[in-house]
Structures are given as structure tokens and as C-alpha cells.
Amino acid sequence: AAELLSQLNTRVSILRLYAMREPGQVETGMDGVRAVIASIVARDSAAADQAVRTFVRRSGDSVLRHIDRQAALSKSALAPTEEDIPQ
């Protein structure tokens, strides 16, 4: 169980790094954390639930944008240039 938890933690850490590389994500992420904390302090479980769901969804969207951009960059790096094409 400890090894599984360690692997999960590693994957979450990698995804967090991907998310934070997105422009504006640090600010958006902190806004999300503040909303979660405010909901908990207010003891508003429905608001906390919604804030956590929003935070996770936005973080996931950020990770997917990062992965898509990296994939596009990889494809363009693999695309032949004029120098690669025989004349």
C-alpha cells in the first residue's frame, strides 16, 4: 500500500507541475484554494464541495491544455523542414 501511495503521489506531483506551467494557472489555482478554504471556514459543505470540484476541473483542464501544446510542439519538431526534403 505504501508503494502504491508513493506512485500516486509522484503522478499527482507531475500533473501539478504541468498545470502550473499554464499561463495564469498559479493565480487561478490560488483563487480556487482560497474559495475552498473560505467555504470550509464558513462551514458551508455545499460551497466547499462545489469549490473543490471547480478547482479540480480547472486544474485538469490546465493539464490537458499543457499536454496538447506539448504534443503539438513534438509533432512540429518531427515535421520535415525544407532542408529535409530532397530537391
Image (spheres, helix red, strand yellow):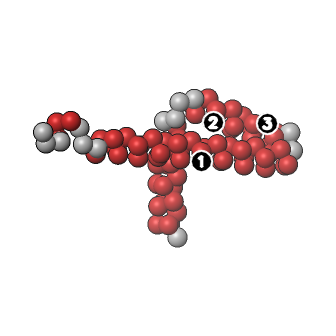
* Amino acid type, mark 1: Gly
Residue behind mark 2? 29
Circles 2 and 3: CB atoms closer than 8 Å: no
Is label 2 or label 1 in front?
Answer: 1
Return the disc, 2 or 3, that comes first in the chain's sequence: 2
Badge 1 or badge 3: first in the primary sequence: 3
Left or right of 74, for residue 31? right
Residue placed under numbered mark 3 in the picture: 38
Residue at 52%, 70% in the rendered image? 1
Instruction: Classify 10 Å Cα crowding around label 2: few (below 14), some (14-19), many (20 and above).
Output: some
x and y percentages locating residue 28 in the rendered image:
64, 32
Nearer to me, 6 or 53: 53
x, y percent for residue 37: 75, 39
Above or below, 37 against 7 in this view is above
As drawn, which residue projects farthest toward the left? Answer: 87
Residue 41, numbered label: none
The front one of 80 and 46 is 80
| Three-letter amino acid code at the position of disc 3 | Ala
Q: Are marks 1 and 3 in contact (CB under 8 Å)?
A: no
Residue 48 x, y percent position in the rendering: 79, 45
Mark 1–mark 3 distance (CA, rounded to whole Å)? 22 Å
Residue type marked 2: Gly
* Pointer 1 residue: 60
Report x, y in % for residue 9: 51, 55
